[in-house]
Image (cartoon, rainbow, N blue to C red):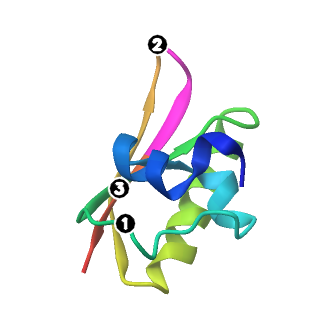
Amino acid sequence: MTAAETPEHITRTRMVTARAILQGQADLRTYPHRLLAVVSHHGLGGDKVSEAVAAAEVLGQFGWDLVNISEFASNKIVYAFLRRR
């Protein structure tokens, strides 16, 4: 886990990278909120969407449901929005 993705940082920003989820580097056990944004900014176009959806599927095993996924044209970053069951 990078220094920027400590449990405290994830809690404060309510965001985590898809890469940290897929590499098993994000610790959400103490995450206190019901909503979470998973951010994907690696790869091109569809690769970012695939990475965000894959991370959402991993989190689905731990009680999270995908609510929405969006690519923001201004910065070309894909966000997957999840809600804890």
Residue 60 percent coordinates (x, y):
45, 79
Farthest top residue?
A: 74
Depth order, front residue of 50/19: 19
Crowding near the residue tagged with mark 3, few <14, some 14–19, many ≥20 C-alpha atoms within 10 Å? many
Mark 2 / mark 1, whichever is N-terminal = 1
Residue 82 percent coordinates (x, y):
34, 61
Residue 25 percent coordinates (x, y):
69, 64
Residue 21 percent coordinates (x, y):
62, 63
Please report contact status of discs 1 and 3: CB closer than 8 Å, yes or no.
yes
Instruction: Please provide the residue range marked out in magenta.
Output: 75-79
> On the image, which quarter does residue 22 sit in?
bottom right
Residue 74 disc label: 2
Please report contact status of discs 2 and 1: CB closer than 8 Å, yes or no.
no
Give how far apart the Cα atoms at labels 3 and 2 are: 21 Å
Secondary structure beneath disc 1? loop
Mark 1 / mark 3, whichever is N-terminal = 1
Is residue 31 shown left or right of residue 61? left
Secondary structure beneath disc 3? strand
> Residue at position x 40%, y 71% from top?
30
Crowding near the residue tagged with mark 2, few <14, some 14–19, many ≥20 C-alpha atoms within 10 Å? few
Judged by its main secondary structure, the magenta piece is strand
The kind of residue on which mark 3 rests is Leu
Image quadrant occupied by the N terminus: bottom right
In this picture, is 67 found above or below 17? below
> Residue at position x 61%, y 65% from top?
54
Residue 31 disc label: 1
> On the image, which quarter does residue 20 sit in?
bottom right
Q: Nearer the viewer, mark 1 or mark 3?
A: 1
Depth order, front residue of 62/42: 62
> Residue at position x 45%, y 76% from top?
29
